[in-house]
Image (cartoon, rainbow, N blue to C red):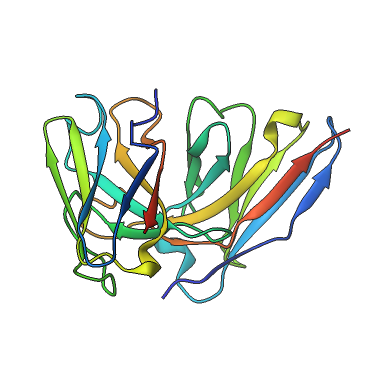
Amino acid sequence: QSALTQPASVSGSPGQSITISCTGTSSDVGGYNYVSWYQQHPGKAPKLMIYDVNNRPSGVSNRFSGSKSGTTASLTISGLQAEDEADYYCSSYTSSSTLYVFGTGTKVTVL
Amino acid sequence: EVLLVQSGAEVKKPGESLKISCKDSKYSFTTYWIGWLRQTPGRGLEWMAMIYPGDSHPRYNPSFQGEVTISADKSIGTAYLQWTSLKASDSGMYFCARRGTYASGNWFDSWGQGTLVTVSS
């Protein structure tokens, strides 16, 4: 089971919107609405930001939103803030016995 | 809110055994699946295994089956990940995390702080 493909880096200025893509296959991203997104600051554990493609857990800012089209999921951060600078990982349930596959990770830089 | 507290960093030699732990300090340990995930610079984040402490039913990523053993002691609210013979390639940061408990549940919403495992001769 290969990792989901994400861009290595994305950057934006404060207040702008950015979008991170996450490309998989019909066995994972394309086959189920079970995509989740995690934010990870250096030296910290990942934090759940989006679950089931476009749902935000309680306490997560509404500046974060998720979507999916075919085998590609996306995370959009609007009104970019300095605190959003972190690594972001997507994940999907997969029909293979691996069960869960993660993305390669995207480093978000706030210029 | 679930609070998962992991055991401390470990430095081991190849061939040695190791058991790391993850304690749930605030929640009902038997009502959710708890997973272990590894993070390394080379392979990123990987889901390894998960267990339902209520009945100790485990599920493994085939890539890790036979390499590690997941277990849980519900009486003390603690999950474990164990190796019998470590390899250098087992080095990495290991996280425990609670699998979601509503909707599809296919996410991890509470994470431990991580346990760094270093295997080196």
Q: Is A16 on the left-hand or right-hand side of B26?
A: left
Q: Nearer the viewer, residue B8 or A111?
A: A111
Q: Residue at x 38, y 26 (%)?
A: A97
Number of marks in picture: 0
Q: Quadrant of the N terminus of chain B?
A: bottom left
Residue at image point 64% right, 29% down = B67
User: Relative to the observer, which residue lies in front, B16 or B93?
Assistant: B93
Quarter placement of the C terminus of chain B: top right
Give the residue drawn at x 63%, y 51%. Answer: B80
Depth check, front residue: A91 or B55: A91
Q: Residue furthest right?
A: B121
Q: Is residue A11 left or right of residue A86?
A: left
Q: Quadrant of residue A40?
A: bottom left
Left or right of B11, for residue B61: left
Give the vertical position of B34 relative to A73 (above or below): below
Relative image position of residue B37 (x, y in whole percent) = 52, 45
Residue A9 location in percent, x, y?
38, 42
Above or below residue A88? Residue A7 is above
Residue B55 in percent (x, y) is at 47, 51
Quarter of the image for residue A76 reads bottom left
Q: Where A71 falls versus A53 (above or below)?
A: above
Q: Position of residue B73 (x, y in %)?
A: 61, 58
